[in-house]
Image: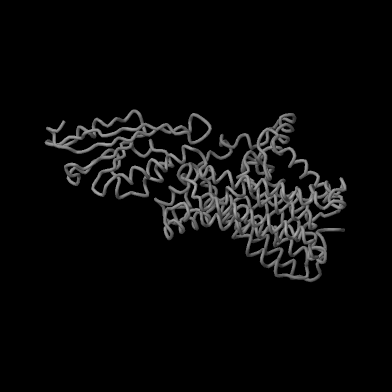
């Protein structure tokens, strides 16, 4: 039975042209991630939902259900909490660990592709992961998706290394240590640990002696204990806070029960954002990648590469099973499927290489293989250029940060900055940026008149139209009054629906003697 390529094939020197191509694609992928990280995109809604939990909770508090019904693994929350408290609240500090995770995942994936695929397929697979939008984006966000990608890549690489040389027990021992850490940092890594268990079983069964079997047993026991403990202590509470199986947000990512509807759903899911590598989108825009992925599955099966197919396809099957039980979304969004990205890129690279060979393009005219790499490079260069032109997710996100920054830049040390509304009326992104200046803000419309000198200024932010500033102006003590200097209204679109519109008004007053006009 043929499994992964033999050691000699995996370690054979690559053609110089392909070696140069893979280096160039990896450099481009690292450069794009680094640029996006250094551009410091404004914190946006989903990030703010997570970050606000770091302001009010300690490490133990992060094990309880989170604000804004967020779901995130505890190790991710703890390391981000530490980054916030040790390095500060800046975008660079909060995104440092996801950025490093994204870079590490790409570099580890180079080795994974090298171990599992022939040179041409490996280069194409690496290029796909290097220049695809979603792995780049999620490596620069305060969300656990970059950790999902890193955990999946590390687990698959370690498993592939042992399958390549099963006489070496070190990779198998490493898996027993790595798996609990992956589960603590990434919820969907449980699907990858399951795939690793399935893929390793035949090889372990064939190995003589007890050492490999003992390590394999230890691996499975630790996976089971770790998953159960993490779910009971943290995951169950977070899952319950989202509404559990009745969570409306992911309903479209759960398979329907009717046969025809299920078939249609499977087609749309697998030609949508799930397969958006290097580009794609919903409603069939990722159909080409899906077809190349299926070609890779066919080619691996034809070559009897059962280990590769087990490592790549079992995570899909387990994730789909979880979706049928309404426990984890399947497809719908690439961000919740980053644990499937390594398998998608591996098999799509394999399918693309097979297609080139079948058309006699790669063997007789190697320039066509390099042309595919150049095309991937252009995708990455286009994404990099787009980020330079638009260094924010939405214009509304950029404006939120700009409004808060402008107010604090213009306000003097003795001026008052007042928030009229209570917390429930303030959007998460505004709340995040405002709370970075906690000691300079008066909340719920309270002005410290004793500290506000004559001639001092008041900056007031209002988010809810049903709360006016008359009470604040009327509270002015005798002998003084507030003279309106300026007023600005903003309507910010932070998403695609009307529910994501936030409104903000900024009032600028000056404290003057009551007799002043």
User: The C terminus lies in which quarter of the figure?
Assistant: top left
The residue drawn where x is 74% and y is 68% is 212
Residue 40 placement (x, y as % from top left): 49, 50
User: Would you identify the image quadrant in which residue 469 lies?
Assistant: top left
User: Does residue 4 appear left or right of residue 502 in this picture?
Assistant: right
Residue 377 placement (x, y as % from top left): 68, 49
Residue 348 placement (x, y as % from top left): 75, 47
- Front-most of residues 50 and 103: 103
The residue drawn where x is 72% and y is 36% is 266
Q: Is residue 165 above or below residue 264?
A: below
- Front-most of residues 106 and 425: 106
Residue 414 placement (x, y as % from top left): 23, 48
User: The N terminus lies in which quarter of the figure?
Assistant: bottom right
Q: Is residue 23 above or below residue 64?
A: below
User: Would you identify the image quadrant in which residue 427 lies?
Assistant: top left
User: Does residue 87 appear left or right of residue 211 in this picture?
Assistant: left
């Amino acid at each position: 039975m043929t499994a992964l390529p033999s050691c000699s094939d995996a370690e054979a020197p690559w053609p110089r042209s392909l070696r140069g191509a893979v280096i160039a694609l990896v450099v481009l992928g690292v450069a794009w991630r680094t640029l996006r990280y250094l551009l410091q995109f404004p914190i946006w809604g989903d990030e703010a939902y997570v970050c606000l939990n770091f302001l009010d909770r300690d490490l133990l508090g992060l094990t309880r259900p989170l604000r804004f019904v967020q779901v995130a693994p505890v190790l991710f929350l703890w390391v981000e909490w530490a980054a916030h408290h040790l390095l500060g609240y800046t975008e660079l500090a909060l995104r440092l660990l996801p950025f490093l995770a994204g870079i590490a995942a790409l570099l580890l994936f180079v080795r994974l592709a090298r171990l599992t695929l022939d040179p041409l397929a490996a280069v194409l697979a690496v290029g796909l992961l290097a220049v695809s939008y979603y792995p780049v984006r999620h490596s620069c966000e305060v969300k656990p998706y970059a950790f999902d990608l890193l955990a999946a890549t590390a687990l698959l690489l370690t498993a592939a290394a042992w399958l390549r040389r099963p006489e070496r027990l070190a990779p198998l021992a490493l898996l027993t240590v790595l798996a609990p850490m992956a589960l603590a940092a990434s919820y969907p890594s449980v699907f990858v640990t399951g795939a690793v268990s399935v893929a390793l079983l035949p090889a372990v069964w064939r190995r003589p002696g007890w050492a490999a079997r003992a390590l394999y047993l230890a691996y499975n026991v630790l996976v089971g204990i770790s998953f159960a403990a993490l779910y009971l202590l943290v995951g169950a509470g977070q899952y319950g806070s989202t509404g559990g199986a009745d969570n409306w947000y992911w309903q479209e990512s759960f398979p329907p029960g009717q046969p025809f509807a299920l078939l249609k759903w499977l087609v749309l899911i697998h030609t949508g954002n799930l397969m958006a590598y290097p580009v794609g989108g919903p409603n069939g825009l990722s159909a080409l990648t899906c077809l190349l992925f299926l070609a890779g599955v066919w080619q691996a099966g034809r070559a009897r590469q059962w280990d590769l197919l087990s490592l790549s396809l079992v995570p899909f099957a387990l994730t789909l099973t979880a979706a049928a039980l309404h426990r984890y979304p399947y497809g719908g969004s690439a961000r919740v499927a980053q644990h499937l990205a390594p398998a998608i890129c591996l098999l799509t690279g394999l399918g693309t290489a097979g297609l080139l060979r079948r058309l006699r393009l790669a063997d007789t005219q190697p320039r066509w293989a390099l042309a595919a790499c150049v095309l991937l490079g252009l995708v990455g260069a286009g994404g990099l250029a787009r980020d330079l032109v638009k260094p924010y997710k939405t214009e509304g996100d950029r404006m939120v940060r700009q409004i808060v920054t402008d107010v604090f830049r213009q306000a003097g040390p003795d001026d008052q900055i007042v928030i009229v509304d209570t917390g429930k009326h303030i959007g998460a992104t505004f709340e995040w940026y405002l709370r970075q200046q906690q000691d300079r803000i008066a909340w719920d419309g309270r002005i410290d008149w004793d500290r506000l000198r004559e001639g001092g200024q008041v900056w007031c932010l209002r988010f809810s139209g049903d709360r006016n500033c008359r009470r604040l102006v009327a509270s002015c003590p005798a002998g003084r009054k507030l003279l309106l200097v300026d007023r600005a209204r903003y309507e910010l679109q932070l998403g695609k629906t009307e529910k994501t519109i936030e409104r903000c008004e900024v009032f600028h007053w000056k404290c003057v003697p009551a007799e002043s006009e």
